[in-house]
Amino acid sequence: MNISVPVGGKWNINTLIPLVVYKNKVEEQYYYYNYSYTYDKTALGNIYLGLQTIDSTSPNAGRNFSFGVFLPTASKNETGNAKFFLDF
């Protein structure tokens, strides 16, 4: 989800909240036995918070400049590392 909020004539506050949803169905066959199972994971990524300035050089052209930081909010596993989707 990306949000851009105007705070002045040429300034915006930008934020990005990445929510990742992963679903995978696995079907395996071992001799005459068939196995089927599903992985369903949801994770939160690093949140971005920043400012953007917009400069119009003409009615048909313009430029912008953005700067910000990524906040370390990604989901983590038991060892403190960033979570991988196929982490069992």
Image (cartoon, grey):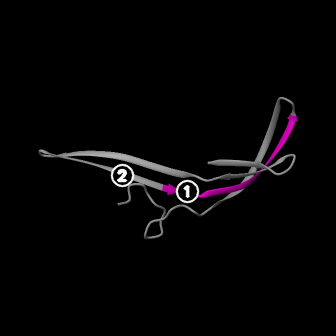
Residue 80: give x, y in percent of width and height: 48, 69
Mark 1 highlights which residue? 45
Kindly check if marks 1 and 2 are in contact, taking CB atoms under 8 A apart as contact.
Answer: no
Depth check, mark 1 against mark 2: the one in front is 2
The kind of residue on which mark 2 rests is Tyr
Q: Number of callouts in the render?
A: 2
Q: Please, what secondary structure does the residue beneath circle 1 have?
A: loop
Reply above or below: 44 against 2. Answer: below
At 38% from the left and 59% from the top, the residue drawn is: 87
The rendered magenta stretch, by its main secondary structure, is classed as: strand
Residue 53: give x, y in percent of width and height: 81, 48
Q: Residues within 10 Å of mark 1 (few under 14, many from 20)?
A: many
At 48% from the left and 65% from the top, the residue drawn is: 76
The residue stretch that appears in magenta? 43-57
Q: Please, what secondary structure does the residue beneath circle 2 have?
A: strand
The kind of residue on which mark 1 rests is Gly
In-image side of 64 versus 45 (left or right): right
Q: On the rendered image, what quadrant is the C terminus found in?
A: bottom left
